[in-house]
Amino acid sequence: MTSQIDLAAAARDHLPADVADTWMSLLRPGIRLITADGGDGPSVGYLGGEPELPDDLAWPVWEGHGPLSFIASVDCAELPRVVTEMGFPVDGRLLFFHFDGRYDDGEAMVFASDPGSQAGTRVVYVPSGQACAERATPEGLEPYKRVWLASRVVSTAPSYDHPVLHDAFGAGFSQVAEPEHPLRRRKFRSALSPGEGPLHQIGGYAWPVQGDVEYEVAQAALGGSVDWRDPALTSEASRWVLLAQFDSDDNATMMWGDVGMLYWLIRPDDLAARRFDRAMFTWQCC
């Protein structure tokens, strides 16, 4: 994912004019989270370290497995005002927790293909004005290194097989369509290179390491056993939007598999109602 100007240039350089116009109409704003000492504005949150939690909130635990690792905290009030357009809260904080395998040496892992394992992740929303205090990491876990984050607005594009592309281009975007659709041609896809990471982000389209993450989350939402060619899967995938993604990050000593990425997705109606407990998780690595 690059800037709006770069995305437009890639579309004009590599796509027929009508396809470029339709594709550019699908672009969504996202908020890239970058290291705060890069001169890109005030801190909007942090990776790792010890989280600030309300006194009456227990540290998130995956029952039968152990405590979740704290991944990140984002102060919604400090995010760019585009959060309003995106449907995100304009105040309060979002905290992300994940059972990353360090507590039990990888015996239990969270996979979208196993819907029951979704209990191994948690998104906590702390409303503005609620008293909080820094909470020590439970015994048996080491906190990740704290990295303060700043933000900047970016334009993001739908990935290779995203449901919005099927909606916009119809039968011509089928995997079996001949000739190959312009959006799937290698030169165009290469032109969309995200550049240097890490690619931490709030909202917008996800940047998948492997396949489109919306289908993985839809599979979990539908029970984990839907045929990948079933139209019901595409329909369900279209109902989910990116809440946040957190990349592997050497500065925070975070490594998800082989240079992977963590993704939380949510349905827009749950986002609007602040039902962050209904967010679902998947992750991918190289």
Image (spheres, rainbow, N blue to C red):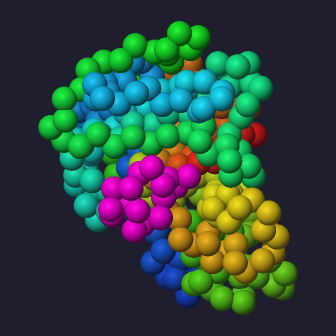
179 inside magenta stretch: no
Image mark count: 0
Relative placement, left or right, of 271 versus 213 is left
Q: Which residues are magenta?
A: 265-280
Residue 221 vs 90, above or below: the answer is below
Residue 46 vs 283, above or below: the answer is above
Q: Quadrant of the C terminus?
A: top right
Taking the spot 70% from the left edge, 72% from the top edge, the residue there is 233
Residue reaching furthest to the top: 139
Taking the spot 42% from the left edge, 66% from the top edge, the residue there is 268
Residue 266 vs 99, above or below: the answer is below
Residue 46 vs 137, above or below: the answer is below
Residue 137 drawn at (x, y percent): 46, 15
Taking the spot 71% from the left edge, 61% from the top edge, the residue there is 223
159 vs 284, nearest the viewer: 284
Does residue 151 show up?
Answer: no
Residue reaching furthest to the left: 129
Taking the spot 39% from the left edge, 68% from the top edge, the residue there is 269
Residue 44 drawn at (x, y percent): 29, 36
Relative placement, left or right, of 124 versus 9 is left
104 vs 230, nearest the viewer: 104
Does residue 282 show up?
Answer: yes
271 inside magenta stretch: yes
146 vs 266, nearest the viewer: 266
92 vs 170, nearest the viewer: 92
Residue 265 drawn at (x, y percent): 52, 55
Residue 23 drawn at (x, y percent): 53, 76
Q: In terms of image quadrants, where is residue 204?
A: bottom left
